[in-house]
Amino acid sequence: MGKTKSQGQSSSISYRAYARYRGVSPEAVSKAVRTGRITVDADGKIDPEKADRQWLENTNPSKALNFASGNSKHRSSSKIAGADTEAAATSPANGLPPFAQSRAIREAYEARLRKLEYEVKIGKLVSADEVRVDAFNIARITRDRLSGIPDMVAPVLVGMNDINEIHRLLSTEIRLACEELTRTRFYTKADKAKE
C-alpha cells in the first residue's frame, strides 16, 4: 500500500507536472527556476502553492498573455500591490521587493519626475536657487534705494524747523522709493526664456 500525504509524502511535483498545472511549457518552468523567479524544494521538485505565489510576485505585469492558455501569466488583480513608494519598507527578508512592487515604485517616481519637469516648463515651478538670487537682488535694490533717501533729503532738512513738514518730506520720499520698486520689473530666467 502506498504512502498518503499524512504519512509524509511531499506535495511537490515535477517540472513537467507543474507546467501542465500552470498551463505553460516545461521550458518556461525551467527558465523560471533558472532565473530565480520560482524556487524548488531540496528534492528538486516544485511545491505548486509556493511556486504560484512566487510566480505572481516575480512576474513582469507588462508582458503579454500566455500564448497556450490565453490567460494572463501575471497578477489576476488589475491593481499592482505596492504601488505606493513606502511599500519598499515591507520587502521580504532577502531585502528585495517582488518585481511588480519594484516596478510600481519606479513608475510612481518616474511619473512624479515627469510632472515636475512639466511644471518647470510651463513656469509653474521655478528653481529654489533662482528664487534666492532674485530675492537677494530685490533686497539689494531696495536697500540701495532706501539708503539713498538721506543723501537726497538731508540738504533740504537742514533748513527746516517744522516737524510736520520734515515728516511729510521723509514720508513722501519713502513712498516714492517704494512705488519705484513696485514698478521695477524683475526678470527671472523663466521670463527671459519666454521673450
Image: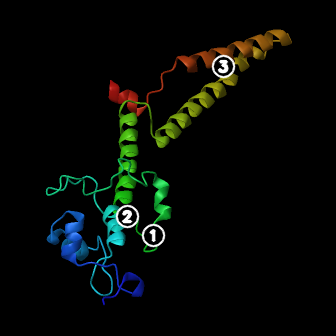
**CB within 8 Å, label 1 to label 2:** yes
Q: Is residue 85 above or below residue 40?
A: above
**Residue matched to label 2:** 98
- Amino acid carrying label 3: it is Met
- Amino acid carrying label 1: it is Pro
Mark 1, Cα crowd under 10 Å, few <14 / some 14-19 / many 20+, is few
- Amino acid carrying label 2: it is Pro
Residue in the picture at 44% in, 35% down: 125
> Which of the image's four quarters has the C terminus?
top left
Separation (CA) of disc 1 from disc 2:
8 Å
Which image quarter: residue 158? Answer: top right
- Residue 157 lies left or right of residue 134; in this view the side is right
Residue in the picture at 81% in, 12% down: 160
Mark 3, Cα crowd under 10 Å, few <14 / some 14-19 / many 20+, is few
Separation (CA) of disc 1 from disc 3:
74 Å
**Residue matched to label 1:** 92
Q: Residue 145 or 75: which is nearer the viewer?
A: 75
N-terminal label among 1 and 3: 1
Q: Does dot 3 land on a helix, a strand or a loop?
A: helix
Q: Is residue 137 visible?
A: yes
N-terminal label among 2 and 3: 2
- Residue 173 lies left or right of residue 71; in this view the side is right
Q: Is residue 161 visible?
A: no
**Residue matched to label 3:** 152
Residue 12, given in percent of the width and then of the height, sits at 31, 79
> Which of the image's four quarters has the N terminus?
bottom left
Q: Is residue 35 above or below residue 75?
A: below
Residue 41, given in percent of the width and then of the height, sits at 33, 82
Q: Is residue 42 above or below residue 18?
A: below
**CB within 8 Å, label 2 to label 3:** no
Residue 47, given in percent of the width and then of the height, sits at 33, 76
